[in-house]
Structures are given as structure tokens and as C-alpha cells.
Amino acid sequence: MSGIPVDRRDDLARIEAAFVGTPLAGLPIGHGPAGTILVADVDPDRLYEAWRAADALVPVTGRRPVLVTDDFDDGLTIRPEPEQGPSESELRAFAEAAASSAPWLSYRHYSEDQQVEQSEIDYHARGTTRVDLSALVSDVALPTPVPVLERAMYDRLLTDADLHAQVLGKVRLVTQTDYWFTPDSVLLMLVPTSDVRSSAYWVDFYGALTCEHQRKLAEVLAQWRHRWDARLVASWGTMLQFQVGRRPTPGDEAWVAAGQLKALAPSLDLRRWEVAVALSAGDVWFVHNRP
């Protein structure tokens, strides 16, 4: 496995020295839970800058960064001494189990199995954007599964420049950092591994409350990193925020990516066809899964 965990006897001075000249310079730093390092007092107005600085330094620190908050978790505090995390063998076993976990068999949006009746066509064809696409699917025989209707709307929307521009203008915000949640108090957590899949061991997410789903989330992070260069920026408990280096192209790529995003983010209030439009036009993704 690549990204072997760093030495538990972390040299805080070495990390502080690496931060010189970045937005993280001079911030309080110390040991966090389960072998992590915490950087406190991150400026909420410079979250993305702070994370990008730490992400660029992964080859130096050996630690993958994720922004977290103690607004809802009193346990996220700097500790006077290092706290033991998983052993190298435990983390390797976690990553191996994640790699064989088939996450998309469990992460499925509830609408994937629903049927659309004639009386519901307006509801589905307007979506959250309220742009009426019903004329695009007037020839689709009903009832039909939700994914079938939405894919027909999406494919036909791609051929109508005016309608596509209307939809894009309303959904573009979800793939911009302006849409992101910003807690009152922010810390940067440096987890003791550079391996993307293994880093999920420390990610706190409502959509991965069990050990089994934690491993599935780890595989999602690995797959998205490989396919889209999607890097986890922040974990706020019910929300995850990603930077994406390779946008899905309109069509099959965007449709598949939108389905996966909706599966992981059932509380994201957009139709799959709306998400597909947004993903091809932005460089950040937002995941929302709440009680």
C-alpha cells in the first residue's frame, strides 16, 4: 500500500517550518485525536487557501489535510501529548477492505427505484431550478423509472443551448466555493498518512457512521481521486467539500458522476439532471447527507 503512515512521533517543528510563507504560518499547532495533527484558528475567510497550502505540502509532511470544525465536537482539541492511532497493519487492513467494498451497491439514491406517473411529470421536469423541461420529454411513455426520464431530459437539454444556459445559470453555484458551508470555528486536521483511501479512517461523515460504510466512503474517495482528481477539502459532519481537478465531460461522464454524487448526498436538493449540468461547469463538489 502506498502512503505508509508517518512516524507517530511527529516533529511539530518540522511541520511548522514547512508552513512558513503559507496561510498556515504561525497558527497554533499540536497533537489531535488518533495520531492526527491539528492546526487551530484557521481563518474562515481563507479556508480554501489554507487547505490548498497543506495539500501542496503532502510530499513534505506525509499527511493528508482535511478541514474540520469543533462547533459540534468538543473532542477536536489540541492535546499535550500524541494520541495513539491505528497501527500500520490496522490501517493496511482498512484500506484493503475498502478496495473490495463495492460502495455503489450501498450508496444509492432512493429515487433510482421510483416510477414517474403522468401526474408527476411537471414535478420532475421543472426540478429545483424551475426551468420547465416538460416539452423535451412529451413523447416519453409513462409511467417510467425516474432515471430513464431524467436521462432523456438531460440528453435533450444538451442539444438545446438556450434551455441549457438557463439551467446552468441556476445550478452553477453548487460547483463554486461561494456555496460552501463555513463554520464559526475551523481547524485543519493532518491525518497520519498520505494515502487517499487510508485517510478516510479519520473522516467524520454522517453518511458513513458504521465501520462498513467508513470503508465504502474510503473507496469512494479513492475512486473519485483516480477518475476526477477529486480531493477532500472539508468534512463538517453532514457535509463534505471537494476540489475537482478534472471536470466530467457533458454526456455519459457527467451523468455517471451526478448519479454517484446524488447517491452519496441524498440531501443535496437538486435533480440528477441538474447536478450533471453543474458538474461539467465547476471545479468543486458539495456533498450533503443529514438526518
Image (tube, helix red, strand yellow):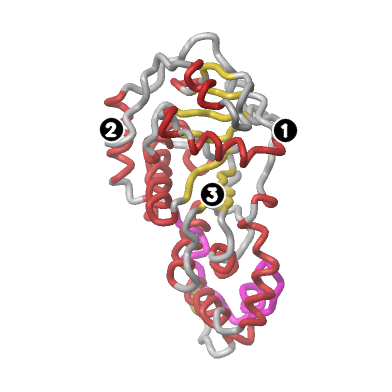
Sequence-wise, the earlier of marks 2 and 1 is 2
| Quarter-of-image position of residue 79 | top right
Q: Residue farthest to the front?
A: 21
Q: Residue farthest to the top?
A: 80
Tell which tag, 3 or 1, sits nearer the viewer.
3
Question: Which residues, given as a range, are shown in magenta?
Answer: 107-133
Tell which tag, 2 or 3, sits nearer the viewer.
3
In the image: residue 215, left or right of residue 112: left
Tell me the quarter of the image containing the C terminus.
top right
214 in relation to 243, above or below: above
Real-space Cα separation, disc 2 to disc 3, in angstroms: 27 Å
List x then y, in percent, for residue 290: 60, 45
Residue 93 - label: 2
Please report the residue visible at 54 percent of the width from the left and 48 percent of the height from the top: 242
Q: Is residue 114 magenta?
A: yes
List x then y, in percent, for residue 228: 44, 56
Q: Secondary structure at mark 3?
A: strand
| Residue under pointer 3 | 243
Real-space Cα separation, disc 2 to disc 1, in angstroms: 36 Å
Dot 1, crowdedness within 10 Å: few (<14), some or many (≥20)? few
| Quarter-of-image position of residue 170 | bottom right
| Residue under pointer 1 | 184
In the image: residue 109, left or right of residue 106: right
138 in relation to 47, above or below: below
